[in-house]
Image (cartoon, helix red, strand yellow):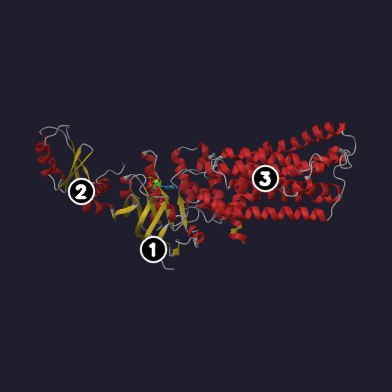
Amino acid sequence: MTTDTPAIEARGLSKRYGDLVAVDGIDFTIPRGEAFGFLGPNGAGKSTTMRMIYRASPVGGGELRILGLDATSGRDDRAIKARLGVIHQEDNLDQELTVRETLEVFCRFHRLRGAAAAAKVDELLDFADLRDRADSLVITLSGGMKRRLMVARGLIGDPDVVVLDEPTTGLDPRARQSLWDKLSRLKRRSATLILTTHYMDEAERLCDRVAIMDKGRIVTVGAPRDLIERHASPSVIEVELADAESAGAVEALERTAEAHASFGGRLLLYTRDGEATMAAALAALGGRPAHLRRGTLEDVFLRITGRGLDG
Amino acid sequence: MKLFGDIDLEMALAVWRRNLTVYRRTWKMNILPNFFEPVLYLVGMGVGLGSYLGEDVGGTAYVAFIAPGLMAASAMNGATFETTYNIFIKMNFARVYDAFLGTPAQVQDIAFGELLWATTRALLYGLAFLLVTAALTVAGLPILTSPWALGLPLVLALTGVLFAALGELFTSLVKTIDLYSYYYTLFMTPLFLFSGIFYPVDRFPHGAAIAWFTPLYHAVRACRALATGDVGVATAADVTWIAVVAALAFAVVPRRTRAMLIR
Ligand SMILES: Nc1ncnc2c1ncn2[C@@H]1O[C@H](COP(=O)(O)OP(=O)(O)OP(=O)(O)O)[C@@H](O)[C@H]1O
Ligand SMILES: [Mg+2]
């Protein structure tokens, strides 16, 4: 097997639960060494896709190859899982173990013992900044520490592909920042990262490419900046519309920008030249405020689906 | 190393180790009741009740009659507790197995590892009981009257395997924890009362014929045979029965558990 075998190749990948189609025939290829993100609202099918990748869920339909191995039949699952690191969406740390014991027990699952296991535990205690809590029971850790321990646990087998389902959900900004640094470090070690997230800044910061999912399908895929260029704009101006805003006033505002959308009582103006459009919009508003910001992946989703990412 | 049914022994032992790690923290507190229980039963029933029964239930002192059966029952209890409530909680509430499955471990490895662990616990229960009976024998009660008694740990372990497999089978079928009260009151309790521990099974019409189909009966008979030295073809048949039923029950477990864990 060569290193140019893609990490993941999915063709027509699908999964249904009874009548519900959770993943609806998606195609994607993730090259080795890439950081790839799945974005999308609750229930879009991100975790279902991830579970099929980390072999906790059988492939429902279509084809899936992981590191060149066959994941469709389940025949190669052991070999695939030996090269994967999994960080689940739910906290499934073993509450009855200490931090060190957690790592030691999972060393066994990755066929490490003796000095090799001790060295790995040592390395990961540092990686997760948990050395001073090594002998604390998992149950006594804070949310951020638990998340770091889950990441460390997922890295025991020196995985070629690391799969993280919402790695930073529920963390405070500092804890997220620290986890991002750790993930960036992994990326530099040329591991392939596959993650899901609800945070646009996280996706833009960590991911080389993202796939935006909705209702089991991939609605668009590409580098975050390219997607914003293509579907939204570098700058966005948000205006809070009054309840009885006159059609003429709205139209005047809309004319200031290259494109626009309205969403939940707000008017979004998309533009390349933020400053100039802002000035024009403010003039049209006659003293009422407007808010200028950068275009985000949220705007991309909104432009494509007409809905917000959190709805 | 790969065993039957694509079981990876190294993964199964990793599961076993996880349980040992947890147990080691509390074993001193956990092991004591394993010694109290036999003392209570043997003194309360064997000596207390036995003094009203005269000298010859099954041709021996009552305490000597019930001790081997109670020993089998304690192995049964150890294996059952581990594979009912404990596995259910790990599977459905703590979701510990989801994390194991994120490694090269597969469902059948976990099922086998838990079987090994439950057998270990059963053996600990049974050995505690055996130690107490050995002490009482030295003190003059005619409980372990044959060198065959050295084979008791083997039968206790086998009893552990059997009830671990049955417990795992039940756990792989139930979706709510409340159903275990049925397992305990409609399965475990009748087994305890009607498997010939306290009186011979032919006290009831067709007692022996019915008992033949139940698991604890064979463990009780095998333990009693080894304790008294009355070992024969029947003992070999009992041991075979236990091994065959344990294998049949466990054979179904991985597939059923996979249906529970993997969606
Ligand atoms: N085991 C299951 N049984 C039945 N339906 C399921 C199961 N797992 C997921 N689903 C359904 O499949 C759909 C996709 O769920 P999934 O967990 O993949 O969403 P998600 O994109 O990860 O959402 P979130 O952002 O909330 O984590 C949902 O409608 C969900 O209810
Ligand atoms: Mg999810």
On the rendered structure, is A138 left or right of A210? right
Looking at the image, how many numbered discs can be counted on the residues?
3
Task: Let me know if marks 3 and 1 both belong to one chain.
Answer: no
Disc 3 + disc 2, Cβ < 8 Å: no
* Residue located beneath label 3 in the image: B79
Residue A34 is situated, as x and y percent measured from the top left of the image, at: 36, 58
Find residue A53 and report its image quarter.
Answer: bottom left
Secondary structure found at label 1: loop
Badge 1 amino acid: Pro
Find residue A268 and report its image quarter.
Answer: top left
Q: What chain letter is assigned to the residue under label 2?
A: A
Which residue is found at the position 13% from the left and 43% from the top? A254
Pick the residue in front: B121 or A140.
B121
- Disc 3 to disc 1, C-alpha distance: 47 Å
Residue B81 is situated, as x and y percent measured from the top left of the image, at: 65, 41
Residue B263 is situated, as x and y percent measured from the top left of the image, at: 47, 51
Secondary structure found at label 2: loop
Question: Is residue B14 visible in the rendered structure shown here?
Answer: no
On the rendered structure, is A174 left or right of A123? left
Pick the residue in front: B99 or A131.
B99
Badge 3 amino acid: Ala
* Residue located beneath label 1 in the image: A6
Residue A170 is situated, as x and y percent measured from the top left of the image, at: 40, 39
> In this rendering, is residue B58 above or below A75?
above
Q: What chain letter is assigned to the residue under label 3?
A: B
* Residue located beneath label 2 in the image: A234
Which residue is found at the position 59% from the left and 39% from the top? B179
Q: Which of disc 1 and disc 2 is earlier in sequence?
A: 1
Badge 2 amino acid: Pro
Structural crowding at the residue carrying mark 1, measured as other residues with C-alpha within 10 Å and reported as few (<14), some (14–19) or many (≥20): some
Q: Does the beta carbon of the residue at mark 3 sit less than 8 Å from ligand 1?
A: no
